Amino acid sequence: MMNTPQRSQWMIGAFLILLMAVTRGHHFASIDHLPSASWAVFFLAGIYLKPLWAFPLLILEAFLLDFAAITFGGVSSFCVTPTYIMLVPAYASMWWAGRWYSKRHQEQWHSLRMMFSSLILGTAVCQIISSGSFYFYSGRFTDPTMVEMINRLIKYSPSQFAAVFFYVGFAIAIHLFLSWFNRTRHAGAKNL
């Protein structure tokens, strides 16, 4: 598993909580035109946060943000149906994709290939679970068909993948910079 010091895990966890709060669509703290980071948050939490209780904590945060937005922020409750509970396995697919990668992580460039494979698979499963369950079982669509579901996946998946890749790419850049900084700092200390 990725060797992240506990202090760093706390800082990363706090940042991920803040990132979800700021970007989860149409909430009181939302930044205009910034895509939701929720899926990426679960993937990154799977990579960096060792405690299993971090997953239900992030699920609770997502629920509370949605509840506050609908109750106090005037956001539409269109997406809140009996299928809302399917966000748990959808987000779990991102979390477990991150955990899977974390166990195989190496500070080498070829490790990125494994990370992106995990990210693509986790995002695809998350998209199928969240969109598929909503489309087929929410009651919002009359006579749902597999053909229409595939058309909806083709239409909406690119923006979901783009958002996830944007945030994970940013996290990779930060990770690489901090790794370089720590190696440089430790190398400089050894030369003194």
Image: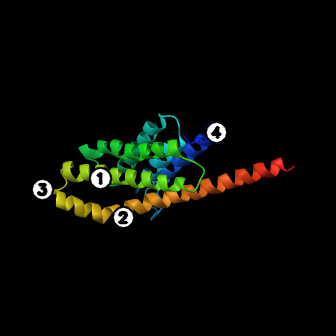
Three-letter amino acid code at the position of disc 3:
Asp
Q: How is the rendered protein coloured?
A: rainbow
Please name the residue that numbered disc 4 is placed on.
7
Please name the residue that numbered disc 3 is placed on.
143
Is 105 positioned to the left or the right of 66 in the image? Answer: right
- Is the C-beta separation of discs 3 and 4 under 8 Å? no
Q: Earlier in the sequence, mark 2 or mark 4?
A: 4
Numbered label attached to residue 128: 1
- Is the C-beta separation of discs 4 and 1 under 8 Å? no
Is 1 positioned to the left or the right of 148 in the image? Answer: right
Instruction: Say which of 133 and 27 sits in front.
Output: 133
Three-letter amino acid code at the position of disc 4:
Arg
Is 190 positioned to the left or the right of 101 in the image? Answer: right
Residue at image coords 15%, 56% = 144
| Disc 4 crowd, CA 10 A, few/some/many (<14, 14-19, 20+) | few
Q: CA distance from mark 2 to mark 1?
A: 13 Å
Q: CA distance from mark 3 to mark 2?
A: 25 Å
Query: Could you tell me which secondary element the residue under label 3 belongs to?
Result: loop
Please name the residue that numbered disc 2 is placed on.
158
